[in-house]
Image: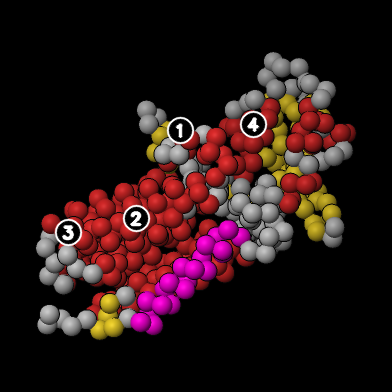
């Protein structure tokens, strides 16, 4: 649920929609929905152009394999190459997280080229011009899934619309003290602190110690683990350096302060921009007959989606490169894809339907 504490929005959503015999995560649900809805959208387009119905089943297979494989390899190559060189067995463990949209984009083009050669015997752009309409919608769903996972966060903000990822913070604290995250409680206070002319809101954290005795080094270790330097990373909070702030209540609960770091909800920015692009492409296909121009929809998709990605990246934490880097990895990867999109948009020509 979303609650308003001090001057931020507290995001306290469990990424797991259902946790039983199997764990169903919101991210997986949105990922699956994107394929289901996208399938129906592309099917309407195929029907509109009198394409054989059996093509759709094969298209789904090529799309699923291309998207997942390309997105995974994109993440491995561009974002965590050193880790996966040492853990090669984890490269295909998609369920552990780690997908990159740039890798998915390149892989989709390759898989659609193979699909066109083996199935439709039409130009690759014939398929891509339809597929990208559904992909734009799916991209928005994926970013909402990222929000549910409290990942791919934005930079710190003093705006009241900033998100404090409470669920993630609770898990970090619970892991540190070896307790269940459900037992961690964050209580609002009227206290804040100003560091480098920036005001931070304080929360009191209650950690049930149970039968454990208070470790005298808890306070020092915790403040060292989550110190002020956290604001230069994607951390959600930092702790007090004042050891006197850490107390144990009469019920053997450790009470300690944390100062929260609200962040720009870039996942929502991207989701909304992708859905607007979807509406534009949908309108272009059905109202402007852009499917009659080879590469026009494909070019518009690549140009708009990766241009918006480039802009939103200015408000994101760097995922791979140092913060001192002029651009983020996502921006460096987006630039050539915007160029590809502009080329196809400008060079698109009307198809001779009498051939």
Secondary structure category for the residue under label 3: helix
Horizontal side of 216 relative to 50 (left or right) equals right
Q: Which residue is mark 2?
A: 34
Q: Are marks 2 and 3 in contact (CB under 8 Å)?
A: no
CA–CA distance between discs 2 and 4? 34 Å
CA–CA distance between discs 2 and 1? 28 Å
The answer to whether residue 82 is visible is yes
The answer to whether residue 279 is visible is no
In primary-sequence order, the first of circles 4 and 1 is 1
Kindly identify the residue that appears in the image at 65 percent across and 25 percent down: 178
Asked if residue 13 lies in the magenta stretch, the reply is no
Read off the magenta span: 328-347
In primary-sequence order, the first of circles 2 and 1 is 2
Position of the C terminus, as image quadrant, is bottom left
In primary-sequence order, the first of circles 2 and 3 is 2
Q: Which residue is mark 1?
A: 89
Q: Which residue is mark 3?
A: 119
Residue 144 or 128: which is nearer the viewer? Answer: 128
Mark 3 crowdedness (10 Å alpha carbons): few <14, some 14-19, many ≥20: some
Of badges 2 and 1, the one in the foreground is 1
Kindly identify the residue that appears in the image at 49 percent across and 46 percent down: 76
Image position, residue 332 (x, y; %): 56, 63
């Amino acid at each position: 649920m979303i609650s308003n504490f001090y001057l931020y929005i507290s995001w306290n959503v469990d990424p797991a929609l259902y946790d039983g015999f199997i764990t169903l995560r919101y991210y997986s649900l949105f990922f699956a929905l994107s394929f289901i809805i996208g399938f129906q959208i592309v099917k309407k387009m195929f029907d509109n152009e009198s394409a054989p119905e059996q093509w759709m089943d094969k298209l789904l297979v090529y799309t699923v394999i291309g998207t997942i494989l390309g997105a995974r390899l994109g993440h491995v190559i561009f974002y965590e190459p050193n880790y996966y060189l040492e853990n090669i067995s984890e490269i295909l463990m998609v369920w552990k997280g780690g997908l990159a949209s740039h890798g998915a984009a390149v892989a989709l083009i390759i898989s659609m080229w193979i699909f066109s050669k083996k199935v439709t015997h039409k130009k690759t752009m014939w398929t891509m011009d339809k597929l990208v309409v559904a992909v734009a919608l799916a991209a928005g769903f994926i970013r909402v899934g990222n929000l549910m996972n409290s990942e791919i966060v934005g930079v710190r903000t003093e705006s009241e619309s900033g998100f404090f990822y409470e669920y993630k913070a609770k898990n970090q604290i619970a892991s540190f003290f070896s307790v269940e995250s459900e037992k961690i409680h964050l209580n609002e206070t009227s206290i804040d602190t100003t560091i480098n002319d920036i005001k931070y809101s304080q929360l009191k954290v209650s950690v049930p110690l149970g039968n454990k005795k208070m470790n005298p080094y808890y306070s020092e270790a915790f403040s060292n683990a989550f110190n002020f330097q956290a604001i230069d990373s994607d951390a959600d909070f930092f702790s007090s350096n004042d050891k006197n702030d850490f107390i144990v209540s009469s019920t053997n609960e450790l009470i300690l302060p944390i100062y929260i770091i609200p962040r720009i909800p870039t996942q929502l920015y991207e989701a909304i921009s992708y859905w607007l692009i979807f509406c534009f492409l949908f309108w272009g296909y059905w109202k402007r007959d852009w499917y009659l121009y080879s590469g026009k929809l494909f070019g518009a998709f690549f140009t708009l989606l990766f241009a918006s990605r480039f802009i939103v990246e200015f408000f994101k934490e760097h995922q791979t490169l140092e913060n001192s880097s002029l651009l983020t990895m996502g921006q460096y990867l987006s630039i050539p894809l915007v160029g590809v999109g502009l080329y196809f948009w400008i060079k698109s020509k009307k198809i001779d339907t009498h051939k």
